[in-house]
Amino acid sequence: MTIEDYLAELDRGLRGPARAKRRLLAEAAAGLEDAVTAYREAGVTDSRATALAVADFGPLDQIRSAFQQDIDIVTARRRALANMMAIPATVGAWKAAWELNPYHPQQVPLPAILIVLTLCLAAIVTFTTAMTTYLATGRLGHRRAWTGTVHALNLCTRGEAAALAVGIATLTLIAPRMFLWPFMFPIAIGTMAPLLLAQFRLARA
């Protein structure tokens, strides 16, 4: 197997951002080329040097698994950073929507209050998980030890997006006057868009 064939097979099984994959494959190519050069300088023929370099680099399944872990971490860090930036704006926008809604505070239905509190709690949990994931995976040596936070972040992000969608739909039914305020729908759509867009991009990655 040539180096090009090895890298092509390695690339075929990887999922995630193209930039992260290119970086890892470039590092693999450089390492393989260095190994081939070292074997050639030791007097090994070209074909044998390539075969030895590929064998030394490791089985495809193992290398692909290790590379995929690193790519997943990169993806999770991007998602964590996006959540850390979007959630405070989301909470602030919903706070403004709550304070400026047509209801008097004492007239707001209890289910609507519970929904808003649930959305705020979901946002806090997601933000905390995102910050923990981003900080815990900052150094490569600690990344694989914190894969649990990555899975937790994935779950929280999906949960936050689902909670927003269900919450808005439910508020429309039980407190429709809240949506008479002209800026309510733009706020609702604007706060959901970053989370839904992130999910769409990650699903296509």
Image: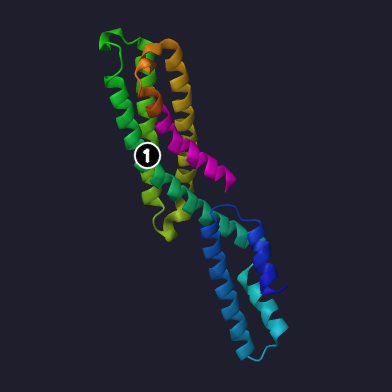
Q: How is the image coloured?
A: rainbow
User: Where does the N terminus fall, quadrant-wise?
Assistant: bottom right
Residue at the spot 49% in from the left edge and 39% down from the top edge: 197
- Does 201 appear in magenta? yes
Q: Nearer the viewer, residue 54 or 78?
A: 78
Q: Nearer the viewer, residue 141 or 119?
A: 119
Residue at the spot 35% in from the left edge and 9% down from the top edge: 109
Position of residue 144 measured from the top left corner of the image (x, y, whole percent):
48, 54
Residue at the spot 37% in from the left edge and 12% down from the top edge: 177
Taken as a whole, is the magenta stretch helix, strand or loop? helix
Residue at the spot 46% in from the left edge and 12% down from the top edge: 173
**Residue highlighted by disc 1:** 86
Secondary structure of residue under mark 1: helix
Position of residue 75 measured from the top left corner of the image (x, y, whole percent):
49, 50
Mark 1 burial class by Cα count in 10 Å: few <14, some 14-19, many 20+: some
The answer to whether residue 22 is left or right of residue 121 is right
Instruction: Tell me the kind of residue under disc 1.
Output: Ala
Q: Nearer the viewer, residue 20 or 98?
A: 98
* Boundaries of the magenta span: 188-205
The answer to whether residue 197 is left or right of residue 55 is left
- Does 195 appear in magenta? yes
